[in-house]
């Protein structure tokens, strides 16, 4: 059986090889997990996979903090209206499309199809954030604030998808009220997340300045507080911890840019470790046989969702200052799926196993989630990279 050291080494090697092939490194790590999983070669112990939840949380925290630390207000205010529309409309259109089609093509109920829809609707910050940060540093599209708009919209898109998924999971497993959870809970969660994030961000800036905290310690404190916020997600007065985490980074960047730059560098190093374990483990949790049995049906479901999302992005950008080429770049930027699908794809299956329920729906949700990563991560990353050079000034 392979231990954590062997998994890290193999994952890094696969990531390096895929980068040389000009493919997303996360795809190589995911394939490593698929090969060594208990469902394939069986080189990783099922007991070891019990730690996957902790790594999923760590990976989400790191990537959300990195996104928040790159969203600059001067660039954001020029595109704020379009960023908000992009954050809500395309993702909802994609999720609702999958919710409608999945029960027709798979043995899933409407609520199970909705769980799958909002998992697939989330854009991957693991692919998008590093690429947009690179384009910001190179000045590509910065005159119109395009990378900043994509960063902000994708962050809120992920928060919205994860929040609605959490409400639907509560309805599915515990019979919670759907109306109050969405209509009442969503605005409170979003506004509460912003207020908590701003408040904690200002407090941390004051404490870091007052006690001369080193950058490594600052990073650890940010990660620890972010994890605590996620653990508070299911309190009676729930706020969106994901919005709070992004807001913390946003405040730090606005008030202490040098501090934000140093934290971004530290977090990019932590992401290397977190991403290896995250994608290797999610691959190891996937039953390849179930993914194979889903076959063309799953592929068509994913492609239909992407098609509807792309059309919604183009409609949202009508009458914007962006040229048609720049609009296509934004369309491609919302294709990649990886982080949220890896973090949330296994959650329904884990909950079903724990409650002694039929696990077939959970296995299908996980299989389609992984298939969406295998298809859209390389396709989206290549499309974004090629279009950035041709479409952005």
Image (tube, rainbow, N blue to C red):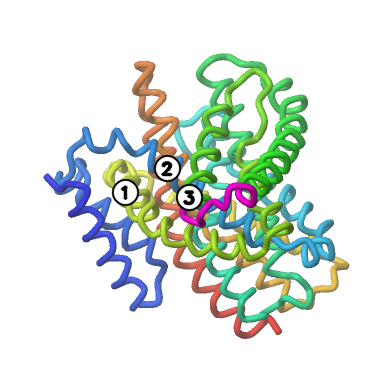
Measure the C-alpha gap from mark 2 to mark 3.
22 Å
Q: Is residue 213 visible?
A: yes
326 w.r.t. 68: above or below:
below
Snapshot quadrant of residue 271: bottom left
Residue 340: x and y in percent read 50, 46
Pointer 2 or 3: first along the chain: 2
Query: What number is the disc on residue 335?
Result: none
Which residue is at a point 73% across and 22% down the rendered structure image?
179
Q: Secondary structure at mark 3?
A: helix
Where is residue 209? Give x, y as percent.
64, 52
In the image, which disc is placed on residue 283? 1
Q: Residue furthest right?
A: 319
Mark 2 or mark 1: whose residue is earlier in sequence: 2
**Magenta-tinted stretch:** 208-216
x 69%, y 54%: residue: 250
Left or right side of 2 for 303: right
Question: Which residue occupies the extreme front position in the image?
Answer: 211
Magenta: predominant secondary structure element?
A: helix
Residue 344 placement, left or right of 308? left
Say which residue label 3 marks: 217
Residue tagged by mark 2?
56
Mark 3 nearby-residue class (10 Å; few <14, some 14–19, many ≥20) = few
Quarter of the picture containing the C terminus is: bottom right
Q: Which of the two discs, 2 and 3, sits closer to the camera?
A: 3
SS of the residue at dot 1? helix
The answer to if 212 sits in the magenta stretch is yes
Q: CA distance from mark 2 to mark 1?
A: 13 Å
Q: Dividing the picture into quarters, in which one does residue 252 lie? A: bottom right
Indicate the secondary structure of the residue bearing disc 2.
Answer: helix
Position in image of residue 315 (x %, y %): 79, 61
């Amino acid at each position: 059986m392979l231990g954590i050291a062997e998994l890290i080494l193999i994952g890094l090697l696969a990531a390096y090889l895929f980068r040389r092939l000009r493919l997303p490194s996360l795809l190589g790590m995911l394939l490593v997990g698929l090969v060594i999983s208990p469902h394939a070669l069986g080189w990783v112990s099922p007991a070891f996979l019990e730690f996957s939840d902790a790594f999923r949380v760590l990976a989400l925290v790191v990537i959300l903090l990195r996104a928040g630390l790159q969203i600059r207000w001067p660039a954001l205010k020029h595109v704020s209206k379009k960023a908000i529309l992009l954050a809500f409309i395309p993702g909802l259109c994609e999720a609702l499309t999958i919710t409608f089609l999945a029960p027709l093509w798979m043995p899933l109920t409407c609520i199970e199809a909705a769980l799958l829809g909002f998992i697939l609707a989330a854009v991957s910050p693991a692919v998008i954030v590093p690429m947009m940060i690179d384009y910001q540093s190179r000045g590509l599209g910065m005159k119109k604030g395009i990378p900043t708009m994509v960063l902000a919209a994708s962050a809120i898109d992920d928060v919205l998808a994860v929040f609605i998924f959490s409400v639907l999971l509560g309805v599915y497993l515990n019979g919670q009220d759907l109306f109050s959870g969405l209509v009442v809970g969503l605005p409170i969660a979003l506004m509460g997340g912003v207020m908590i994030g701003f408040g904690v961000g200002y407090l941390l800036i004051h404490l870091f300045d007052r006690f001369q905290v080193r950058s490594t310690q600052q990073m650890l404190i940010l990660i620890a507080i972010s994890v605590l916020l996620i653990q508070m997600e299911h309190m009676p007065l729930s706020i969106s911890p994901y919005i709070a985490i992004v807001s913390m980074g946003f405040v730090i960047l606005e008030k202490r840019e040098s501090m934000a730059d140093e934290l971004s560098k530290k977090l990019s190093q932590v992401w290397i470790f977190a991403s290896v374990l995250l994608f290797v483990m999610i691959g190891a949790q996937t039953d390849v046989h179930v993914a194979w049995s889903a076959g063309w049906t799953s592929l068509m479901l994913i492609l239909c969702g992407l098609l509807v999302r792309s059309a919604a992005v183009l409609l949202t950008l009508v009458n914007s200052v962006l040229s048609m080429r720049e609009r296509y770049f934004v369309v491609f930027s919302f294709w990649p799926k990886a982080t949220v699908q890896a973090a949330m794809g296994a959650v329904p299956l884990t909950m079903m196993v724990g409650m002694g329920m039929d696990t077939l729906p959970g296995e299908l949700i996980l299989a389609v989630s992984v298939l969406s990563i295998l298809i859209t991560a390389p396709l989206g990353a290549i499309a974004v990279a090629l279009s950035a050079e041709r479409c952005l000034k």
